[in-house]
Every structure is written in structure tokens, then in C-alpha cells.
Image (cartoon, rainbow, N blue to C red):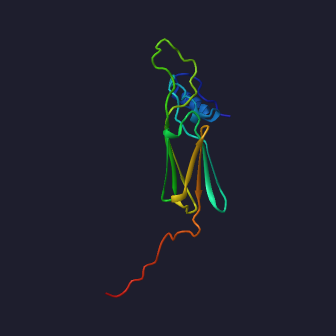
Amino acid sequence: MKNLPTSATDPLARLHRHIDDLFSNSWLTRAWPGNGDVAGPVMPSLDVSEDDKQITATAELPGMDEKDVEVTLADNVLTIKGEKKSEREEKDEKKNYHLVERSYGSFRRSIGLDADVDAKNVKATFDKGVLKIVMPKLAQPQAKSTKIEISRA
């Protein structure tokens, strides 16, 4: 195995440690190393399933309310976006945080759907930090393109 730089000031060694941290930690929900008490980006866990009648997407959004989330469906792309606000008290300047792993901030997830869904009958529910979106499929797929006959003028 190749010898890697070990100096704390060596940029390659620092990069190597950061990459190791990315893969050894759940970096999407943890503080970025070296940024003090700034939490990393929020990225909700998402499950998408499908059966003959519908597509269901379920997202974990702990610590959020339905008013903090927006769901849209356009051109067979489901988009979930929102913002998890910090619950820390900024008033207490004497409080020193020793570890910050909770994430705050804005997020946006978009998922392309392989089936045509009935956008008018999509239902979204939010319960105990879990967003569930049920998208009924159209009975007959809509034509993606239509051939237009050309006639003489």
C-alpha cells in the first residue's frame, strides 16, 4: 500500500482525512469537519415504491412540520423541498457547543417518475415527521408524442 502524507499541514493529508470522514460518517446529516459548529446539509431519506395502481413516495423529515415542506409534481417529476430551522438558542453567548450533529437548512429532492400519474388525485399526508405522497397512475398512459399529418396548402 502506498504511503500517504501524515502532516496536519499537508493539503493532501487533509484532503485524504476529509474523504475518509465523508465515507465513514453519514456526512449528509453530520457537521462538516473543520467548520466548527456549522451543521451540514439536510437531505431527507426517501423510499419510492410502485404497484399496478399507484406510486408511493415516503420521506423522513424529523423535527419538521407540514408547513415547512412543499411538494410539486410537474412533467412527471416529483419535487419535495423545504427548510428545517435551527432550534438552538442564539441568545446565550456563554454556551459552548462541544458537538453539533443535527442538521439545519434548506433541501430539495427531485425524482423522475417512469409512469404517468393522475396529478389531480395525488395525496400527501404528514404524520410524526414522515411525509407520504400517493400518486395514482393514469388508466391509459398519455401519448408522449403525436404524429401530425401534413397536407397540401
Above or below, comparing residue 34 to residue 144 in the picture:
above
- Residue at the farthest left position: 153
- Tell me where residue 117 appears, x and y as whole percent: 55, 61
Residue 107 in view: no
Quadrant position of the N terminus in the picture: top right
- Tell me where residue 48 appears, x and y as whole percent: 62, 51
- Tell me where residue 136 appears, x and y as whole percent: 59, 59
Q: Quadrant of residue 129?
A: top right
- Tell me where residue 29 appears, x and y as whole percent: 58, 33
Q: Quadrant of residue 152?
A: bottom left
Above or below, comparing residue 147 to residue 137 in the picture:
below
- Viewer-proximal residue, 64 or 79? 64
For image coordinates 37% across by 86% down, the residue present is: 151
- Viewer-proximal residue, 73 or 103? 73
How many numbered marks have been drawn onto this rendered protein structure? Answer: 0
For image coordinates 58% across by 43% down, the residue present is: 126
